[in-house]
Image: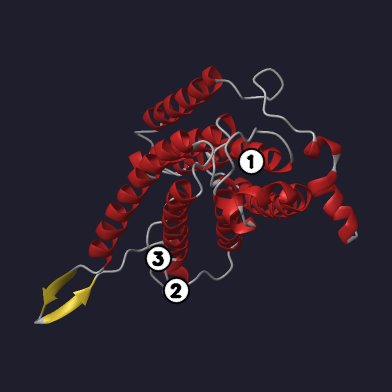
């Protein structure tokens, strides 16, 4: 596939160019579908967890977790590339209209002009990103079948990601381009790493997934501050109400994650006085047993 063909299928195809978010034409675009799907996800996760409560051994999943990680890594990379190419095409086609507002491409990435409609190339990839959030929830069921704890953070994080990506489309919310690029960029790396370790290859001697999560959350905080500054400087960003709600949800996720991270670090660095010497207790995981490296619990992102 030549670069020109790749650009065509990722940013110039009629399906992408003519996309329009519509409650009648876009699958999964209604509020009833959003709340029903999240409720179904939560109930099915809890019910499956209760059904397997007395089972001690994890169910064999074979290659499915590895294939899921590989698929999510490739899908994330495709969305990242498609969003980047589509954003470049939109800047090329509409930049002339920004002169009256002195808007730069970087500002447009963070702050859509007032009156922006959810149609066109960028919103097509935002829609694909929204749909992939449902594929992301499969990790919850993998965790339950493996007899891992069904944590509140996992359920909350997956549900909030679905809600936020829906709001991006429903209200043509500013910041979503940067949000998609940051998230899919990190996801392509994290899921590639999960596939790498799932097939038995050497894992990192540091909490790789946790560090990626910290980078993603940190970048999100910086971008949210940028949106707020541009909103007052430029006279308004489109979908600022939805952005404010998303900011609250992001803050909740950040607080939960920091709380988990701090508790995890305290446990991993806990010591007991043995013969006058401090003995460091390192969590035993599959990676620890294989290569002698401690890995903080793989928290979902």
- Dot 2 or dot 3: first in sequence order is 2
Q: CA distance from mark 2 to mark 3?
A: 7 Å
For the residues bearing labels 1 and 2, Cβ distance under 8 angstroms? no
- Dot 1 or dot 2: first in sequence order is 1
> Is 39 left or right of 270, judged from the image as shown?
right
Kindly identify which numbered label has been placed on residue 295: 3
Q: Residue sitting at 66 percent across and 53 percent down?
A: 80
Q: Quadrant of residue 174?
A: top right
Q: Which residue is mark 2?
A: 205
Residue 223 place in picture, x, y as percent: 47, 55
Q: Residue furthest front?
A: 100
Residue 90 place in picture, x, y as percent: 74, 48
> Could you tell me which quadrant the N terminus lies in?
bottom right
User: Is residue 150 visible in the rendered structure shown here?
Assistant: no
> Is 267 left or right of 14, judged from the image as shown?
left
> Is 202 left or right of 45, judged from the image as shown?
right
Residue 16 place in picture, x, y as percent: 78, 39
For the residues bearing labels 3 and 1, Cβ distance under 8 angstroms? no
Q: CA distance from mark 1 to mark 2?
A: 35 Å
For the residues bearing labels 2 and 3, Cβ distance under 8 angstroms? no
Q: Which residue is mark 1?
A: 126
Q: CA distance from mark 3 to mark 1?
A: 33 Å
- Neighbour class for label 2 at 10 Å: few (<14), some, many (≥20)? few
Frontmost residue, 257 versus 227: 227
Considering the numbered disc 2 on the image, is that residue within a helix, a strand or a loop?
Answer: loop
Considering the numbered disc 3 on the image, is that residue within a helix, a strand or a loop?
Answer: loop
Q: Nearer the viewer, mark 1 or mark 2?
A: 1
- Dot 3 or dot 1: first in sequence order is 1
Q: Is residue 210 above or below residue 254?
A: below
Q: Quadrant of residue 105?
A: bottom right
């Amino acid at each position: 596939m030549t670069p020109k063909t790749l650009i065509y299928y990722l940013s110039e195809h009629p399906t992408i160019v003519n996309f329009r978010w519509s409650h009648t034409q876009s699958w999964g675009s209604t509020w009833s579908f959003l709340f029903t799907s999240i409720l179904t996800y939560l109930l099915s996760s809890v019910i499956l967890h209760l059904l397997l409560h007395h089972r001690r051994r994890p169910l064999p999943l074979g290659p499915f977790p590895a294939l899921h990680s590989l698929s999510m890594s490739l899908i994330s990379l495709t969305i990242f590339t498609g969003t980047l190419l589509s954003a470049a095409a939109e800047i090329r086609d509409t930049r002339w209209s920004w002169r009256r507002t002195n808007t730069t491409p970087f500002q447009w990435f963070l702050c859509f002009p007032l009156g922006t409609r959810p149609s066109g190339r960028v919103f097509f990839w935002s829609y694909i990103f929204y749909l992939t959030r449902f594929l992301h929830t499969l990790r919850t069921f993998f965790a339950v079948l493996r007899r891992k704890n069904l944590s509140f953070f996992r359920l909350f994080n997956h549900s909030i990601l679905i809600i936020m990506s829906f709001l991006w489309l429903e209200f043509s919310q500013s910041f979503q381009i940067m949000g998609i690029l940051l998230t899919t960029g990190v996801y392509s790396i994290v899921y590639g790493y999960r596939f790498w370790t799932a097939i038995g290859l050497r894992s990192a001697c540091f909490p790789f997934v946790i560090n990626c999560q910290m980078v993603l959350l940190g970048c999100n905080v910086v971008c949210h501050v940028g949106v707020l500054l541009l909103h007052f400087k430029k006279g308004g960003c489109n979908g600022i109400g939805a952005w404010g709600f998303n900011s609250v949800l992001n803050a909740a996720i950040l607080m939960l994650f920091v709380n988990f991270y701090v508790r995890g670090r305290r446990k991993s660095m806990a010591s007991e006085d043995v013969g006058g010497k401090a003995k460091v207790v390192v969590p035993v995981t599959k990676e620890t047993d294989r290569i002698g490296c401690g890995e903080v619990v793989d928290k979902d992102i």
